[in-house]
Image (cartoon, helix red, strand yellow):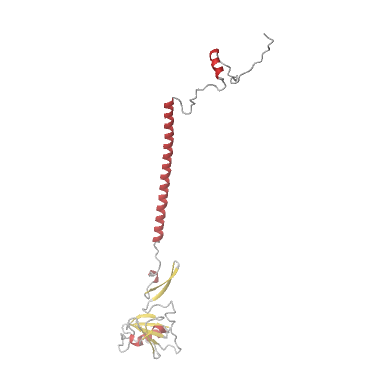
């Protein structure tokens, strides 16, 4: 804060109390020879009806008094002003607040800090509202600094979801085990089928070697069912029989007795 230029026609300042918040006043910086008169010059030059002093060196200006619920005991503002040690200029996180006399109109207090979610904290910091994915995050940064570089402590992590990764790994392992199990069962069944075929082939070869003929060949040595046993015995010595005759039934022949 540069040395404030004198402003002519100043009215007397009016003490409003000691506050634990500077909202909605704006910090004008520090001054080596700070006093209530120096801060009044600064704020009246800007047309601001309210001023506050803190830490003995810093001047704040604004259009409203701090919220009523941030008002504290006067004894809390016990730091002497750097330029005039017979008066107090707030304290650490405390503001001695005055009306500058720039207007005769009544000055209202800002909304209570409990009902105003946009009020910045009492440390003289500015507030920024940033929309994070899926939610609104309120973060505070030092006054005058860039909010673009500030990182809200409540912002959700942009890293991958660890739970999702773990679930994906488990599912992948289960699927892989299922595939391996399916391949094992298929190969085992295939091997069983091959072994069964080989067993059947060995049985066929053994049967052939034992009986001297391929499996399935009839072992029956019986004669033609059409043959009468007695006819068969008789015809063996007389010669072959006609294959187109049925000798299984006896044929009765009728002869004419008149024929000799």
Q: Which residue is pictured at 42% across the width and 27% down the height?
A: 210
Q: Which residue is pictured at 53% across the width and 13% down the height?
A: 237
Looking at the rendering, which quadrant does residue 20 occupy? bottom left
Quadrant for the N terminus, please: bottom left
**Residue 165 or 43: which is nearer the viewer?**
165
Direction front: furthest residue: 257
Can residue 135 be seen from the camera position used here? Answer: yes
> Is 155 drawn above or below residue 17 in the view shown?
above
**Residue 58 or 160: which is nearer the viewer?**
160
Direction top: furthest residue: 260
Looking at the rendering, which quadrant does residue 121 occupy? bottom left
Quadrant for the C terminus, please: top right
Q: Position of residue 90 (x, y in %)?
A: 34, 84
Q: Position of residue 247 (x, y in %)?
A: 59, 19
> Is 99 drawn above or below residue 241 in the view shown?
below
**Residue 34 or 64: which is nearer the viewer?**
64
Q: Position of residue 61 (x, y in %)?
A: 39, 83
Looking at the rendering, which quadrant does residue 39 occupy? bottom left
Q: Position of residue 83 (x, y in %)?
A: 31, 86
> Is 197 drawn above or below residue 244 in the view shown?
below
Q: Is residue 42 left or right of residue 249?
A: left
Q: Which residue is pictured at 43% across the width and 37% down the height?
A: 196
Can residue 160 be seen from the camera position used here? Answer: no
């Amino acid at each position: 804060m540069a040395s404030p230029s004198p402003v002519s026609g100043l009215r007397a300042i009016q003490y409003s109390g000691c506050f634990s918040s500077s909202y909605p006043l704006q910090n004008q910086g520090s001054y080596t020879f700070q006093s209530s008169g120096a801060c009044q010059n600064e704020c009246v030059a800007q047309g601001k009806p309210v001023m506050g002093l803190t830490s003995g060196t810093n001047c704040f200006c604004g259009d409203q008094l701090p919220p009523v619920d941030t008002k504290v005991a006067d004894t809390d503002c016990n730091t002497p002003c750097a330029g005039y040690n017979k008066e107090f200029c707030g304290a650490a996180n405390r503001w001695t607040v005055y009306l500058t006399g720039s207007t005769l109109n009544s000055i209202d207090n800002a909304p209570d800090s409990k009902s105003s979610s946009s009020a910045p904290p009492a440390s003289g910091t500015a507030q920024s509202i940033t929309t994070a994915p899926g939610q609104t995050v309120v973060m505070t940064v030092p006054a005058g600094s860039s909010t673009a570089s500030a990182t809200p402590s409540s912002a959700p992590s942009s890293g991958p979801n660890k739970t999702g990764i773990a679930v994906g790994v488990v599912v992948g392992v289960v699927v892989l085990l299922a595939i391996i199990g399916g391949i094992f069962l298929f190969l085992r069944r295939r091997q069983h089928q091959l072994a069964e075929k080989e067993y059947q082939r060995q049985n066929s070869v053994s049967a052939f070697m034992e009986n001297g003929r391929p499996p399935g060949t009839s072992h029956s040595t019986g004669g033609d069912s059409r043959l009468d046993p007695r006819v068969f015995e008789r015809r063996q010595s007389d010669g072959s029989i006609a294959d187109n005759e049925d000798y299984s039934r006896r044929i009765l022949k009728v002869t004419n007795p008149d024929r000799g």
